[in-house]
Amino acid sequence: MSSPISCPDSRDRVGVSRLTVVAALRVLRDEGWIESQQGKGRFVRGRPAMASAKQPRPGQAYLIAPETTSAGEVVEAAAVAASNRIAALLNLAPKIKVFLRRRLISRDGEPTEIVSVWVPLALSEGADLTSADPLPQGLRDHLQSRKGVRFDHVVEQITARMPATDEAKQLGMPKNTLLLAVYGAVPDASGTALAVVEVLLPADRHERENAYPTA
């Protein structure tokens, strides 16, 4: 194990106050870069144990990030009949009309994922979601600024399935390759469903890593 980190007379050593050094060490500890041991001091970890846990999950990332930050095209933006899964996640009756915005995302010129967002029709009215141009804001901020709603959290589900014919064609998938389907149901603070985001990931091109404490 490496030598412990000390708090020297920091005004002489690095030109900042001791309180600043202590605060910085607290941030490093909270982010997993160092660990504290009672009576021994603070020790540098080989890598931040929880760094990957702070990365946005797929559904969250596409709700927050502006569409302009990812290359892709809008392949559908229209009112559609909700499937049983989407209707259940939105707390709506099956086959009821909802608004769907779907994009095919590309990286290095190759299609890599399909991102779909469903919202109740009432929430889509006047929200400028039909444009083929990428949104300059993430969907969360876009709907918040136009409809006054606030997303509270995301309930995520991950399933694996075979792709539909059109999905396999859009993604250029070889035969017998599974899709990872990540669904995120997004309610407000009262529990009212506001949106469902689905990210379709060809299993041969993606892998997920997560980190979490053992305690």
Image (cartoon, helix red, strand yellow):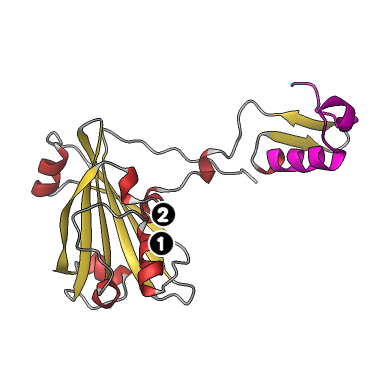
Residue at 9% from the left image edge and 48% from the top image edge: 166
Query: Image check: 168 left or right of 31?
Result: left
Give the residue at mark 1.
141
SS for dot 2: helix
Return the residue nearer the eye: 127 or 88. Answer: 127
Q: In x, y percent, where is residue 163?
A: 16, 46
Q: Which mark is residue 169?
A: none
Residue sitting at 38 percent across and 48 percent down?
Answer: 58
Name the element at disc 1: helix
Asked if residue 60 is among those painted magenta in the image, a careful observer would answer no
Residue at mark 2 = 64
Q: Quadrant of residue 93?
A: bottom left
Identify the amino acid type marked 2.
Ile
The alpha-carbon separation of the residues under discs 1 and 2 comes to 7 Å
Instruction: Say which residue appears at 44% left-offset and 72% top-offset.
Output: 188
Label 1 or label 2, whichever comes before in sequence order = 2
**As displayed, is residue 7 above or below residue 53?**
above
**Is residue 8 placed above or below 198 in the rendered structure?**
above
| Residue closest to the eye, 120 or 144 | 144
Q: Is residue 138 above or below residue 21?
A: below
Is residue 169 positioned above or below 102 on the image? above
Q: Which residues are magenta?
A: 1-28
Residue 207 percent across, percent down from the top left: 36, 36
> What kind of residue is marked 1?
Asp
Camera-side residue of 145 and 121: 145
Q: Quadrant of the N terminus?
A: top right
